[in-house]
Image: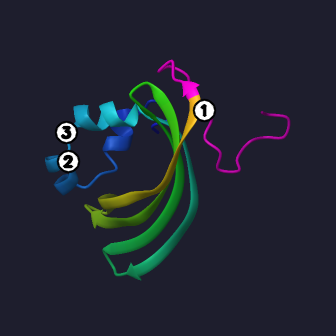
Amino acid sequence: MVYHKEYQKAYDCFSSSVKKEVSFDDFKSGARDVRYLKIISIKTIDEEENLIKMQIEAVMHLVYKGQLYEALYTGKVDTYRENGNWKVMTVDLEAKSQKPLGKKSDGKTLQRLDFGTKKQGEK
């Protein structure tokens, strides 16, 4: 959703408790800095009827002060069933490594997300 600039749809995936802490404008501002995201692993560490706790590892390309960086993030993501729908309740990720990619960002071009869904012949 972020890749397609559907920020409101992405924001609606958060639980009401997260929305109380993070305004839509703050979320949208931060989401614009994400240029690439690839989830390396997701492991369920606890599961109940209305709560799932997961360990996640992801690579992200982010813009910081006009420079493009690649960072490896690990941490926990908890989802909660709210009104029959799963919502993100907590995100606690920490950068384990980070390196500059040596590119200036024009702030417009987003890299294609790679979840193994590219059709043959696409680059």
Q: Which mark is residue 120?
A: none
Instruction: Tell me the residue that label 2 is attached to.
Output: 19
Give whichever of discs 1 and 2 has the lower sequence position: 2
Marks 2,3: beta carbons within 8 A: no
Marks 1,3: beta carbons within 8 A: no
* Residue type for callout 1: Gln
* Residue type for callout 3: Ser
Residue drawn at x 37%, y 73% as measured from the top left? 52
Disc 1 versus disc 3: nearer the observer: 1
The boundaries of the magenta stretch are 103-123
Residue drawn at x 52%, y 56% as measured from the top left? 58
Rendering coords of residue 75 (x, y %): 41, 65
Q: Tag 2: Cα neighbours inside 10 Å, few (<14), some, or many (≥20)?
A: some
How far apart are labels 1 and 3 at the CA level?
26 Å
* Residue type for callout 2: Lys
Instruction: Tell me the residue that label 1 is attached to.
Output: 111
Q: Which quadrant is the C terminus positioned in?
A: top right
Residue drawn at x 33%, y 79% as measured from the top left? 49
Element assignment for label 2: helix
Element assignment for label 3: loop
Q: Which mark is residue 23?
A: 3
Q: Is residue 56 magenta?
A: no
Q: Is residue 104 magenta?
A: yes
